[in-house]
Image (cartoon, helix red, strand yellow):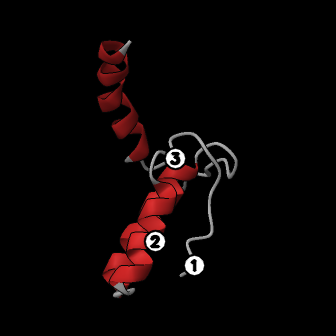
């Protein structure tokens, strides 16, 4: 299965970069990992305290297929 999944990545990337693609809506109940991780990165960029970032990172550990969580920042 991984080989098939990886072979689809170039096709998916082309679709994401096409002129017709405006935005992506994530499932708030199932695709939390993507949103949570992006907000964690935003926290690093924004200069959120290392303590808050560590707490948020700990909260997200192992969250593969779960809800979007409140990171507290």
- At x 62%, y 62%, the residue is 69
The crowding category of the residue bearing disc 1, from other C-alpha atoms within 10 Å (few below 14, some 14 to 19, many at least 20), is: few
Mark found first going from the N terminus, 1 or 3 = 3
Dot label at residue 7: none
Q: Which residue is mark 2?
A: 55
Label 3 residue SS: loop
Q: Is residue 6 above or below residue 39?
A: above
Q: Are marks 1 and 2 in contact (CB under 8 Å)?
A: yes
Q: Is residue 53 above or below residue 25?
A: below
Q: Which residue is mark 1?
A: 72
Q: From the image, state whether disc 2 or disc 3 is nearer to you.
A: 2
Depth check: give the residue in front, 47 or 19. Answer: 47
- At x 34%, y 17%, the residue is 2
Q: Position of residue 46 (x, y in %)?
A: 37, 85
For the residues labelled 2 and 3, the Cα–Cα distance comes to 14 Å
Q: Which residue is mark 3?
A: 63
- At x 40%, y 33%, the residue is 12
Label 2 residue SS: helix
Depth check: give the residue in front, 29 or 71. Answer: 71
For the residues labelled 1 and 3, the Cα–Cα distance comes to 17 Å
Label 1 residue SS: loop
Mark found first going from the N terminus, 2 or 3 = 2
For the residues labelled 1 and 2, the Cα–Cα distance comes to 9 Å
Q: From the image, state whether disc 1 or disc 2 is nearer to you.
A: 2
- Can you say which quadrant of the picture contains the N terminus? top left
Q: Are marks 1 and 3 in contact (CB under 8 Å)?
A: no
Depth check: give the residue in front, 61 or 4. Answer: 61
């Amino acid at each position: 299965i991984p080989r098939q999944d990886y072979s689809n990545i170039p096709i998916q990337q082309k679709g994401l970069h096409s002129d017709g693609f405006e935005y992506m809506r994530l499932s708030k109940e199932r695709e939390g990992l993507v949103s949570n991780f992006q907000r964690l990165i935003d926290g690093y960029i924004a200069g959120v305290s290392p303590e808050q970032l560590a707490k948020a990172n700990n909260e997200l550990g192992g969250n593969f297929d779960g809800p979007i969580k409140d990171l507290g920042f």
